[in-house]
Image (cartoon, helix red, strand yellow):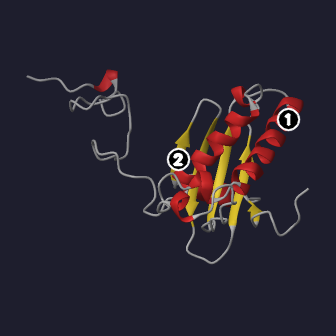
Amino acid sequence: MRGPDDAPLVGRLTKRREFVAAASGRRFHSERMTVQGLRRDDEGTLRVGFTVTKKVGHAVERNRIKRRLRHAAREALARGGADLGCGARHDAAADRVPDAPLPPHPLPPADIVVIARRPALQAPYSSLIDDLARALHVVTKPGGARPDRGGAPRGPRRGRGDASGQTSRRDAPPSGLSEKTP
């Protein structure tokens, strides 16, 4: 059994505004979950929150999914930098003695939100751990928030008109008051 000193310090997200703030950060998608994360500038710890919508199933199934994900998150975090590094460490295998445990990788202060999907209920436990380990690496990477994917600038979208410049029904004059041309 693990002692309290072995587990990384991880807090919980409890307020809605914390969940909403994490949604503006980086994202990781898999078949079983979506993970959103936002690095913080303070000296706090990593904080994790779990969300399972009612669309996923009834209360017993949602609670089971949350329990599985909480435990898988503990395992993924306990692996530390060994699995989260994904090339971020220099050749750590060459520096250590074979079969010696890797030193724990410090977790950056970040807010992580795990949004579960229905397949997380029946998924093999090892795949949940692998997904979370990859997701933690992706969403806690240094850098800005969500990268700009290019494309057209997003402005206010109103009406049903298309981008060709045609007016929407909202912008057209009422049918009984149309302008008549002489």
Q: Secondary structure at mark 1?
A: helix
Q: Residues within 10 Å of mark 1 (few under 14, many from 20)?
A: few
Q: Position of residue 50 (x, y in %)?
A: 73, 47
Give above or below for 63 relative to 119. Answer: below
Work out whether residue 98 or residue 142 is closer to the camera in this orientation and state it. 98
Image point (20%, 27%), residue name: 179
Amino acid found under the numbered disc labelled 1: Arg
Tell me the tag on residue 64.
1
The residue lying toward the viewer, choosing from 149 and 11, is 11
| Quadrant placement of the N terminus | bottom right
- Above or below, 104 against 155 in this view is below
Q: Where does residue 23 sit, x and y in percent of width and height?
A: 57, 52
Give amino acid for label 2.
Answer: Arg
In this image, 6 relative to 95: left or right?
right
Which residue, as the protein is rendered here, is positioned at the far left? 182
At 37% from the left and 32% from the top, the residue drawn is: 170
Q: Is residue 157 left or right of residue 74?
A: left
Percent from the top left, x then y, of residue 69? 76, 42
| Residue drawn at (29%, 45%) of the image | 150
Above-or-below relation of 82 to 46: above
State left or right for residue 97 relative to residue 90: right
Question: For mark 2, does the 10 Å Cα neighbourhood hold few (<14), some (14 to 19), or many (20 or more) residues?
Answer: many
Quadrant hosting residue 3: bottom right
Residue 15: image quadrant is bottom right
Q: Earlier in the sequence, mark 2 or mark 1?
A: 2
x then y, percent, for residue 56:
74, 28
- Which disc number belongs to residue 19? none
- In this view of the protein, which residue sits in the foreground, 4 or 177? 4
Pointer 2: what residue? 27
